[in-house]
């Protein structure tokens, strides 16, 4: 792993690793937990690996690596899947390149990797706990998929750290969502009006600075709106929220109050 790329060889994988593979020219990455024996547990939308429920699906499905990959018979999700599925490594990668998500990175490295969804300042729990969470959620689900508040990266970060977002109205743990939506929005809103008509280089420098600052502040390792929750407690809360809310796929069930 290095400054520019987290690419790794399959032979270096260990149970409990958080892995990902970019889809569609680095627009979107799919994340999962490697649990050993060539198996990956990951969170999807109704069992569909690239399903986001947004217009982004048109691009992902038409040009992503999965278009060239035919899932093996043992990895086809069952109908009515709750979203957490187990796949072989090849089916998870779907023709893409293997990368490993980095934990406990220093702030300088975090900022240097401008693209979110590759690393975090947070510390991972021991591998056996990570694998236990992933397997438990495979059998019990992770709530409703939401591309901005409860996606595959949120799932893997929870498995690695046990942290969940307290406030349902805020964005989830996903670095991808923060970098694509939260960071640019914060930069735009925080740029003084006088800079909009000033030197474009100064405006760009200000925007980049605000963007980097917002990414650090929104990282799961820095946020104050998260709490540690054991997986058994999480699934009980998910079941209660599901009963109260009904089958609404737009509600980010893993958030707690």
Image (spheres, rainbow, N blue to C red):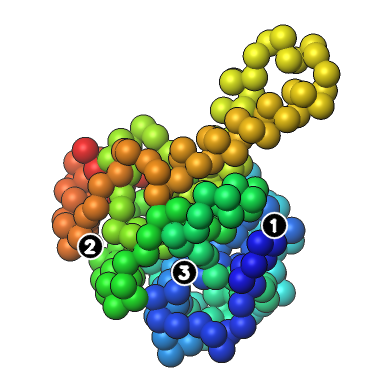
Q: Which mark identifies residue 231?
A: 2
**Front residue of 128 and 66:** 128
Disc 1 designates what residue? 26
Disc 3 designates what residue? 18
Look at the numbered disc 1 and give the secondary structure of its residue: loop
- Which residue lies at the image location 71% right of the left edge and 74% below the top edge? 68
- Mark 2 or 3: in front is 3
> Which mark is first along the chain, 2 or 1?
1
Q: CA distance from mark 2 to mark 3?
A: 17 Å
Occupied quadrant, residue 104: bottom left
**Front residue of 41 and 45:** 41
Look at the numbered disc 2 and give the secondary structure of its residue: helix
> Crowdedness of circle 2 by 10 Å Cα count: few (<14), some, many (20+)?
many
Q: Residue 74: percent from the left, percent from the top?
A: 47, 86
Task: Locate the N terminus and report the quarter of the image it occupies.
Answer: bottom right
Judge from the rendering whether residue 170 lies leftward or rightward of residue 181; answer left or right.
left
> Crowdedness of circle 3 by 10 Å Cα count: few (<14), some, many (20+)?
many
Q: Residue 238: percent from the left, percent from the top?
A: 23, 52
Q: CA distance from mark 3 to mark 1?
A: 18 Å
- Which residue lies at the image location 58% right of the left edge and 84% below the top edge? 10
């Amino acid at each position: 792993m290095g400054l520019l790329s987290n690419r790794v060889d399959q032979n270096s994988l260990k149970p409990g690793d958080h892995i990902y593979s970019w889809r569609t020219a680095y627009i979107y990455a799919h994340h999962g937990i490697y649990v050993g024996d060539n198996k990956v547990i990951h969170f999807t939308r109704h069992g569909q690996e690239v399903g986001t429920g947004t217009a982004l699906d048109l691009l992902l499905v038409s040009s992503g690596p999965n278009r060239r990959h035919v899932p093996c018979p043992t990895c086809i999700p069952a109908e009515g899947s709750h979203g957490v599925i187990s796949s072989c490594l090849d089916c998870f990668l779907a023709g893409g390149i293997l990368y490993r998500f980095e934990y406990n990175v220093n702030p300088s490295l975090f900022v240097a990797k401008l693209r979110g969804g590759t690393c975090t300042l947070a510390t991972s729990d021991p591998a056996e706990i990570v694998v236990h969470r992933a397997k438990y959620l495979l059998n019990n689900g992770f709530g409703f998929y939401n591309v901005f508040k409860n996606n595959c990266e949120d799932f893997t970060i929870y498995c690695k750290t046990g942290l969940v977002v307290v406030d349902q109205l805020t964005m989830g743990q996903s670095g991808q969502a923060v970098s694509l939506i939260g960071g640019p929005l914060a930069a735009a809103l925080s740029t003084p009006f006088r800079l909009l008509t000033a030197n474009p280089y100064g405006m760009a420098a200000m925007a980049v600075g605000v963007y980097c600052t917002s990414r650090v502040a929104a990282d799961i390792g820095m946020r104050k709106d998260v709490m540690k929750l054991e997986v058994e407690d999480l699934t009980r809360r998910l079941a209660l929220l599901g009963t109260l809310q009904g089958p609404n796929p737009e509600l980010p069930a893993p958030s707690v109050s």
